[in-house]
C-alpha cells in the first residue's frame, strides 16, 4: 500500500462541517470589502494629485504656467 492510499484511507472518514462554507463566504466578503477600500483610496489619491496640480498651475507656482506653455508650444 502506497503513502497516497494510506492517506486516503486515513482521512476518508473525515468530513467538513456545515459552518465551513459559511466561513469561506465570510472570508470572501471581507476580501471584497478590503479591495473596495483600496480602490477608493487610490481614486482619492489621484483626485488629490490632479487637484494639487491644478492649484499649482492656477497659482503659477515656480513659473509652471510658462514652463507648460513653452513645452506645449503655445
Image (spheres, rainbow, N blue to C red):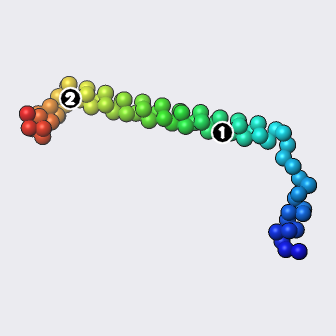
Q: Position of residue 72 (x, y in %)?
A: 12, 38
Q: Is residue 45 left or right of residue 70?
A: right
Q: Is residue 56 left or right of residue 19?
A: left
Q: Position of residue 6 (x, y in %)?
A: 88, 68
Element carrying mark 2: helix
Q: Is residue 30 visible?
A: yes
Q: Is residue 63 visible?
A: no
Q: Which mark is residue 28?
A: 1
Q: Position of residue 58 (x, y in %)?
A: 20, 25
Residue 31 against residue 7 in the figure, above or below: above
Mark 1 vs mark 2, CA separation in Å: 44 Å
State the image quarter where residue 23 is shown. Answer: top right
- Which of 3/42 is in front? 3
- Foreground label between 1 and 2: 1
Q: Position of residue 44 (x, y in %)?
A: 42, 30
Residue drawn at x 54%, y 33% is: 36
Residue 26 against residue 55 in the figure, above or below: below
Residue drawn at x 82%, y 38% is: 19
Residue drawn at x 85%, y 43% is: 17
Q: Are marks 1 and 2 in contact (CB under 8 Å)?
A: no
Residue holding disc 2: 57
Rendered-image quadrant of the N terminus:
bottom right
- Which of 32/4 is in front? 4
Residue drawn at x 8%, y 33% is: 74
Mark 1 crowd level (few <14, some 14–19, many ≥20, 10 Å Cα)? few
Q: Is residue 74 left or right of residue 13?
A: left
Amino acid at each position: 500500500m502506497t503513502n497516497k492510499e494510506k492517506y486516503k484511507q486515513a482521512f476518508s472518514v473525515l468530513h467538513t462541517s456545515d459552518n465551513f462554507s459559511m466561513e469561506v463566504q465570510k472570508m470572501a466578503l471581507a476580501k471584497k470589502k478590503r479591495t473596495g477600500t483600496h480602490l477608493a483610496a487610490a481614486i482619492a489619491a489621484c483626485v488629490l494629485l490632479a487637484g494639487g496640480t491644478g492649484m499649482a498651475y492656477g497659482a503659477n507656482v515656480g513659473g509652471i504656467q510658462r514652463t507648460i506653455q513653452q513645452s506645449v508650444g503655445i
